[in-house]
Amino acid sequence: MSEVLKEVIEANQSYAKTFGDKSKLAMPPARHFAILTCMDARLDPAKYAGLSEGDAHVIRNAGGRASDDAIRSLVISHKLLGTKEWFVIHHTDCGMESFTDEIMNDLLASSLKTASVDSSGWHDSGEGPGSTEGKYINWLTISDNAKSVLEDVLRIRNHPLVSKDIPIYGYIFDVASGELKEIPEATEAGKIS
């Protein structure tokens, strides 16, 4: 058993002992909102948004991007579970700013092992086999953080399955200060129409 697996199982056993009334939480989020944010381990949406278990839906992926699957989750969140407001929250110093689709595709074509990065760029640390399947994926990399928040809010707002009566707010979480900073153009684009 790996050390990480052991730690997770032990932590879960401690958590389960004090689970108590959480088994009675309703499936729909009590505060009726959803957050789409990055999977970065430095972000804790429960803390930066003041959430308790059962309060909100939190959808996480690389970059907090409005991928098809993220939009799928938001639509389910609203249509079946009643969320009424959505937040798109990217963050400073995001790893998605450190590469392009071309870099990712080249790394994957070389090897499926974990790559490394240094001052001269990304390097493959493994030897083949690789795969060219990555070239069929839009990695949704980020070159301008505020612009990517706006793009994602617009992608969600303009999706044919998204109700026009859901406000969508655009923010960037600052990993240096812990503050949420609004991207006014994104929030304006996400207004109810």
Image (cartoon, rainbow, N blue to C red):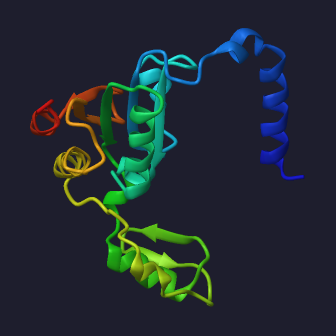
**Who is closer to the viewer here, 129 or 133?**
133
Residue 167 in the image: state x and y as whole percent. 22, 29
| Residue 179 sits in quarter | top left
Query: Which residue does the image show at 43% across and 68% down from the upper left?
Result: 118
- In the picture provided, is 177 more to the left or to the right than 30? left
**Who is closer to the viewer here, 26 or 79?**
79
Q: Identify whether 1 is placed above or below 30.
A: below
Q: Identify whether 52 is placed above or below 160.
A: above
Residue 43 in sight: no
Query: Which residue does the image show at 46% across and 79% down from the upper left?
Result: 134
**Who is closer to the viewer here, 42 or 79?**
79
Q: How many marks?
A: 0
Q: Residue furthest right?
A: 1
- In the picture provided, is 74 more to the left or to the right than 127? left
Residue 38 in the image: state x and y as whole percent. 42, 45
Residue 19 in the image: state x and y as whole percent. 76, 16
Q: From the image, which quarter does the C terminus lie in?
A: top left
Residue 154 in sight: yes
Query: Which residue does the image show at 21% across and 30% down from the upper left?
Result: 165
Query: Which residue does the image show at 31% across and 32% down from the upper left?
Result: 87
- In the picture provided, is 143 more to the left or to the right than 141? left
Residue 82 in the image: state x and y as whole percent. 42, 25
| Residue 144 sits in quarter | bottom left
Q: Residue furthest top?
A: 21
